[in-house]
């Protein structure tokens, strides 16, 4: 019993020594982690571990005293981030053998290619926009020039027409016949003041006996309109030509007395249509009125001078005296 107890006491002492050794090892390991010293190689760690085990092995004499105790083996595992680093570094290959360099190079090339494409697209867009703008300006300028040319041609044509066309001018001469039971007859002076002849002229006219109006706004009823049958042809810059117009209805005695008394007047209105050398139809309108006093003046002119000039006493109506 005494031998067993002594053996147990030695066993407890050894356990205490082993615990102290383990505590020292753990403390040194923690302190090494804090200070982050160079990590020893796996061989050094294994050698130290064997030396520590040899220092704490059982005495051989203890085998004679009793049962041999099993030695305590302590294994220390280092964290993943503190794994032993090989003392010999592997030889690195050339830079072009690394895939990362190729990925980086391809990415850079793609970036520069994209930037270049953007720049080229911007320059192409700017050039296209400028070309379109220049084209629009050129088209607008050409259109304006064409319109100006057409307008100039039209103006030149109109100017030529105005300069070379015929102009028939009319003026009232006199009333020739005003008698009961006879047709009213009027003489109108017509002149071609244009540079070219007038041809195929016709006269559409009519007479009317009506009361005088203060505004001289007279017209001839459509049923009184007559179309002359003789064509009118006048040379350029012609002398005044007397155009004699006759009413188709005889003057009644009642209307004659009203004309003498001044209650009625005689109105003659119409239009002369003709063609110029350009084949364009032209016209000149006329609208005159005569009262009894004006007719008497015509008689005095005939008695005194033997004729009536290009224009005798008459009144121009408010409208109907114009030309194209």
Image: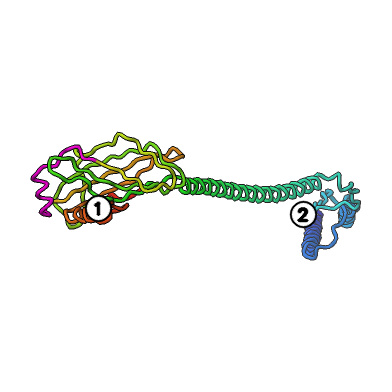
- Which element is circle 2 on? helix
Residue under numbered circle 2? 81
Specify the quadrant of the image occupied by residue 250. Answer: top left
Is the Cβ of the residue at disc 2 closer than 8 Å to that at disc 1?
no
- Which element is circle 1 on? helix
Q: Can residue 77 be seen in this view?
A: yes
**Residue furthest to the top:** 229
Tell me residue 87's x, y (percent). 90, 53
Numbered label attached to residue 109: none
Q: Can residue 9 be seen in this view?
A: no
Q: Residue at x 77, y 45 (%)?
A: 106
Label 1: few (<14), some (14–19) or many (≥20) C-alpha neighbours in 10 Å: few
Q: Is residue 263 above or below residue 232?
A: below
Left or right, 164 with reference to 105: left
Left or right, 30 with reference to 279: right
Give the total of numbered labels: 2
Which residues are the magenta region? 246-263
Q: Which residue is drawn at 26% across and 49% down?
A: 287
* Whole-number angstrom distance, CA of label 2 to CA of label 1: 146 Å
Residue 257, magenta (yes or no)? yes
Left or right, 176 with reference to 180: right
Q: Residue at x 69, y 50 (%)?
A: 123
Tell me residue 105's x, y (percent). 79, 48
Residue 286, magenta (yes or no)? no
176 or 25: nearer the eye?
Answer: 176
Specify the quadrant of the image occupied by residue 99. Answer: top right
Residue under numbered circle 1? 302
Tell me residue 246's x, y (percent). 23, 40
Tell me residue 124's x, y (percent). 68, 48
118 or 323: nearer the eye?
Answer: 323
Label 2: few (<14), some (14–19) or many (≥20) C-alpha neighbours in 10 Å: few
Query: Disc 2 vs disc 1: which is toward the camera?
Result: 1
């Amino acid at each position: 019993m005494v031998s067993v107890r002594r053996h147990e006491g030695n066993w407890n002492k050894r356990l205490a020594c082993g615990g102290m050794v383990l505590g020292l090892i753990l403390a040194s390991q923690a302190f090494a982690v804090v200070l982050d010293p160079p990590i020893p190689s796996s061989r050094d760690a294994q050698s130290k571990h064997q030396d520590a085990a040899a220092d704490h092995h059982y005495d051989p004499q203890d085998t004679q005293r009793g049962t041999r105790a099993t030695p305590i083996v302590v294994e220390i595992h280092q964290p993943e981030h503190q794994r032993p680093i090989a003392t010999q570094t592997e030889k690195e290959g050339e830079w072009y053998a690394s895939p990362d360099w190729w990925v980086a190079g391809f990415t850079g090339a793609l970036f520069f290619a994209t930037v270049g494409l953007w720049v080229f697209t911007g320059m192409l867009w700017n050039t296209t926009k400028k070309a379109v703008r220049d084209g629009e300006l050129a088209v607008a300028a050409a259109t304006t020039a064409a319109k100006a040319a057409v307008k100039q041609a039209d103006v030149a044509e109109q100017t030529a027409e105005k300069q070379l066309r015929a102009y028939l001018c009319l003026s009232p001469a006199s009333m020739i016949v005003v008698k009961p039971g006879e047709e009213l007859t009027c003489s109108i002076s017509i002149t071609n003041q244009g540079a070219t002849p007038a041809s195929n002229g016709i006269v559409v006219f009519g007479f009317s006996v009506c009361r005088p109006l203060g505004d001289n706004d007279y017209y001839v009823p459509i049923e009184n309109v007559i179309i002359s049958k003789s064509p009118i042809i006048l040379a350029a810059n012609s002398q005044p030509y007397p155009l004699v117009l006759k009413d188709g209805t005889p003057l009644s005695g009642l209307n004659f007395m009203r004309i003498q008394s001044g209650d009625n007047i005689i109105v003659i209105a119409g239009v002369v249509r003709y063609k110029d050398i350009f084949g364009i139809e032209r016209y000149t309108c006329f609208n005159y009125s005569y009262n009894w006093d004006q007719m008497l003046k015509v008689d005095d002119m005939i008695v005194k001078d033997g004729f009536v000039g290009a224009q005798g006493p008459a009144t121009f109506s408010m409208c109907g005296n114009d030309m194209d």
